[in-house]
Structures are given as structure tokens and as C-alpha cells.
Amino acid sequence: MVGVLALQGDVREHLAALAECDVIARPVRRPSEIDDINALVIPGGESTTMSKLAQTFEVFDPIHKRIAEGMPAYGSCAGMIMLADTVLDGREDQRSFGGINMTVRRNAFGRQVDSFEEPVDFNGESFPAVFIRAPWVESVGENVDVLGTIASGKAEGRIVAVRQGHLLATSFHPELTGDLRVHRLFVEMVAEHVG
Ligand code: GLN
């Protein structure tokens, strides 16, 4: 059972992508629902709002704890920010669940660049990536595998997909493109974890 954090953001698109991967997925927004899931997807949206709502709905601490205990999680865009140990250009009161030993910069591609599509090298393959006011990974610490970088252009080489053990994050939104490779990788990670 994979939960999609349903406080804000593109929840429906992740639910649809997971359903296509033949996974039982459901939206979660209450503390009791966090107990029932084996894994969590944190959608794209707005990380400052998500941070605030997670505290208001009292799911911040339970999710933080589950992630720290090893529950697999995947975050796209705002979800990547929520999984970062360190956030640059965030709001002062913004909190992340953390878990991935990385520093991400919010709205890193420039505020004027609202959204764009750009091929990314993901896991050794080309991936059509959609970016919407996206963060990039400024730096990674030990034990973080870089899975994806921008393939060309001004931001060439910038890190946009990472994995650390049970945690996966992308700056871009595979849930919006119908390309299931990132979700399939996550489902494999979940399957490994639950045995
Ligand atoms: N800029 C947003 C944030 O900081 C992320 C945008 C997105 O998820 N598409 O949370």
C-alpha cells in the first residue's frame, strides 16, 4: 500500500501513475492513515504550504518518524524539497521531513523561468522531464546516488534526481508525462523493502 500525501499538490497524477504500475495507492492526510502505508509519495506543489499543512494536520511528526525508520518515500519537485536535509531559499519557518543528505535550492532555475521541458539523463537513459518552478540539488553528501542530471543547455550537469537508500527524489514531474520509469523504479524499491 503506497500513500500519496494529499495535503496539496498534484496528488491525482501520482495516484494515476501508481495505479498504472499495478500498485494499490491511496491519498493520505490523517495521522492514522500514515500508520497503514508501506511507502509514501510526496507530490509536486508548494513546499512551504505543504510544510505548514503537514504540521496543521499533525502528520509532520509521524511522517518524519516513519521516514527516519526506513519507510520508502519518493518526492517530486516540492516533494524533493520535503525530503532534503537542507533547503536553500526556503521560507524561514519552512520544515522538511529530511532523510536525503543533500542541499536543494528552491526555484533554482530562476523565478522568471516558470516551467520548461528538458531531456534529462536518468539512470543512464534519456528522460523527458517537465520542470515547474523546480528546485535543483546544489550538493549531495555521502551515500547519495546521483541518478539524473540536466543533459544540455545553461543548467547542464545540474543534479535533478537522487536516491539515498529507501528514498528517491526528482526535481521534475514524471507524474505529468505518462512516462512511468521513475514510478516503476520506486515501486521496485518498495517491493525490495517489503520483501
Ligand atoms: N517551487 C515549489 C516549492 O518550492 C515547487 C514547485 C513544484 O513542486 N512544481 O515548493
Image (tube, rainbow, N blue to C red):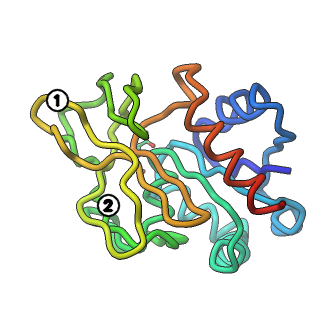
Q: How many numbered marks does the figure carry?
A: 2
- Mark 2 residue type: Val
> The C terminus lies in which quarter of the figure?
bottom right
Which is nearer the eye, 88 or 54? 88
Mark 2, residue position: 104
Is the residue marked by circle 1 packed among few (<14), some (14-19), or many (20+) residues within 10 Å?
few
Q: CA distance from mark 1 to mark 2?
A: 20 Å
- Where is 118 relative to 30, above or below? above
Residue at (43%, 66%) from the top-left corner? 84
Residue 54 is left or right of residue 104, and the answer is: right
Mark 1, residue position: 152
- Where is 144 relative to 62, above or below? above
Residue at (73%, 54%) from the top-left corner? 190
Residue at (36%, 54%) from the top-left corner? 146
Residue 103 is left or right of residue 31, and the answer is: left
- Mark 1 residue type: Ser
**x%, y% of residue 80?**
46, 54
